Image (cartoon, rainbow, N blue to C red):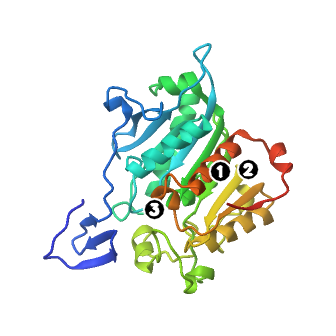
Amino acid sequence: MESSSSSLSIVVEIPGMLRVYEDGTVERLLDKGSVPPSSQLGNESREGVASKDVVIDPQTGVFVRLFLPPLEVTDGKQRVPVLVYFHGGGFCLGSAVWPGYHNHVCKLATEAKVICVSVEYRRAPEHRLPAAYDDCFGVLEWLNSQSEGAECVPIDPWLASHADFRNVVLAGDSAGGNIVHQMGILASERNWDGLRLQGAILVHPTFGGKEPIGREVGQQVEGRFKELPDSIWGMVLPAGADKDHPFLNPIGPLSPALSTLPYGRMLVFVAEKDLLADRGIMYYEALKKAGKDADLVITEGEGHVFHLDKPKSEKTFAILKRISNFIHSSSSDDSKNPSHNISV
């Protein structure tokens, strides 16, 4: 439940973003509004990209926003890769229908010529982790059922006509980057017949740990999250969990081995002035040590999820282009470029 009450005590507050009151009500201060899909606007598309919402679970309210870019269709069934996108917001904020995320994913669909599946999952503190993971993994299960044409599931015509289910890439920023990692852990125990996770893209992923490192110990940072108080993890993580819990620390003492991740290739973005940059770099280094095919891209002079605040900047376009190249390249293509640490 979301509301505010001046008569109630605030038990948790993230300044300018969120308040939780003593009776459990939640006030989200960072309200970015919403953008309807083109299907609710007389199919008026943005930049030629059509969009629509599909409910995955009526009980939880989980849905996806599908984006279909203009395609050069000759036989009515041009197949393109599928990019599944998980929004950020510290697991407490953000939405697939926020203008920033809607526009960003729309641009990804245009730039990379892919079908995008943007996931609307349940948020904390009303729904602690692993609720968001369960919702997002449910979307992957739904996609697999779409690929198999399961009789018990309504088949989406866009996916049926244009999705290459053997070429699926997962991506997300901030908390969404964390979700990408966790989807890999969960998918490592699945053997889907129709769905193939070819790659993973983590943009400014939200990771942490009990021992502070790098920028977490006082270095000046910029962006949406200049600090992440411990109180946020107290309402996001399972009750009683600390910051070395595998949900937050992917390379902690209790975390599954990174070598089990099923992704053929991985791409990690960090921003120089982001509080979380050192965690992202540490994660990349751990991936390499585990023998994973991974690249690291460092954006100089920018803060956390700057691409949402500066959608028209050259550095944002560089991220879009790098993601498109990643989706459409193969491991052999990447091996031609020996540099795995790229600054933009």
Q: Are marks 3 and 1 in contact (CB under 8 Å)?
A: no
Question: Which residue does the image show at 66% across and 70% down from the upper left?
Answer: 251
When the figure is inspected, residue 277 is found, relative to residue 211, above or below; the finding is above
Label 1's element? Answer: strand
The nearer-to-camera label among 3 and 1 is 1
Q: Are marks 1 and 2 in contact (CB under 8 Å)?
A: yes
Q: Disc 3 designates what residue?
A: 129
Note whether residue 189 is visible.
no
Please rate how many residues cluster around mark 2, counting C-alpha atoms within 10 Å: few if below 14, some from 14 to 19, many from 20: many
Label 2's element? Answer: strand
Q: Disc 2 designates what residue?
A: 265
Please rate how many residues cluster around mark 3, counting C-alpha atoms within 10 Å: few if below 14, some from 14 to 19, many from 20: some
Question: Which residue does the image show at 54% across and 66% down from the upper left?
Answer: 206
When the figure is inspected, residue 53 is found, relative to residue 302, above or below; the finding is above
Rounded to the nearest angstrom, the CA distance separating label 3 from label 2 is 26 Å
Of marks 3 and 1, which one's residue comes earlier in the chain? 3
Label 3's element? Answer: loop
Of marks 1 and 2, which one's residue comes earlier in the chain? 1
In this rendering, position of residue 127 left or right of residue 187:
left
When the figure is inspected, residue 10 is found, relative to residue 179, above or below; the finding is below
Q: Disc 1 designates what residue?
A: 200
Q: Amino acid at mark 2?
A: Arg
Looking at the picture, tell me which residue is in the foreground, 194 or 39. Answer: 39
Quarter of the image where one finds residue 63: top left
